[in-house]
Image: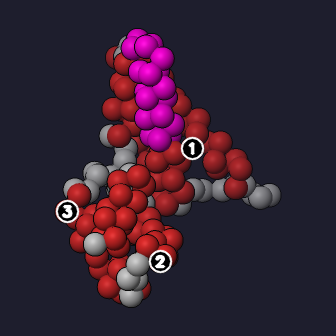
Amino acid sequence: MSLKEKIDQDLKSSMKSGDKTRLNAVRSIRAALLEKEVSIRVGGTAVLTEEQELEVLVSLAKKRRDAIEQFTAGNRLDLAETEQAELAVLEEYLPAPVSDEEVTAVIQNIITTTGAASMKEMGKVMAEAMKALKGKADGTRVQQIVKSLLSA
């Protein structure tokens, strides 16, 4: 079952169950995927690849996390809780996050492959690491691990 079919099915079930938070989250995911589909459409019909779908989901999750941070800082805990609930629904569609140990292993492999030895080559390592860990690890966490490994 494709992601789009799963989202459509989840949309129907959340409408029937009356779960407003889940319904809003699934609707926003569906709308974002549709928007991406329309943006790449040239002439005919466009179907998103799994990578493009993942890109949309990661972007939505990042926006939710930023909103939670801002609402918490602004002492709007009610809005932060709503965003947190919608983020939990969104994370059901994302691949399982990898542990710091797995991220470190991937980055060490990239450092060995590229021959990076100093912080000057951080950009090269980050580019490869983000390709390898796209959607599986937060970019900030990857950056911290790359810095610690290159500065050691």
Residue position marked by numbered label 3 in the rendering:
101
Can residue 121 be seen in this snapshot? yes
Q: Residue at x 41, y 52 (%)?
A: 140
The CA distance from mark 1 to mark 3 is 32 Å
**Amino acid tagged 1:** Leu
Front residue of 140 and 13: 140
* Residue in the image at 43% along x and 35% along y: 65
Type of the residue with mark 3: Glu
Pair 2/3: label in front:
2
Dot label at residue 121? 2
Q: Which residues are magenta?
A: 60-78
Q: Is residue 61 magenta?
A: yes
Sequence-wise, which precedes: disc 1 or disc 3?
Answer: 1
Q: Which secondary structure lies at badge 2?
A: helix
Query: Around disc 1, counting alpha carbons within 10 Å, would you say few (fewer than 14), some (14 to 19), or many (20 or more)?
Result: many
Which secondary structure lies at badge 3? Answer: helix
Residue that numbered label 1 is attached to: 33
Q: Residue furthest left?
A: 101
Measure how far apart labels 2 and 3 are at the Cα level.
Answer: 22 Å
- Neighbours of disc 2 within 10 Å: few (<14), some (14-19), many (20+): some
User: Is the C-beta separation of discs 2 and 3 under 8 Å?
Assistant: no
96 lies left or right of 130: left
Percent position of residue 51, x then y:
49, 60
Q: Is residue 106 above or below residue 38?
A: below
Dominant secondary structure (helix, strand or loop) of the stretch shown in magenta = helix
Q: Relative to 40, is 106 above or below?
A: below
Q: Amino acid at mark 2?
A: Glu
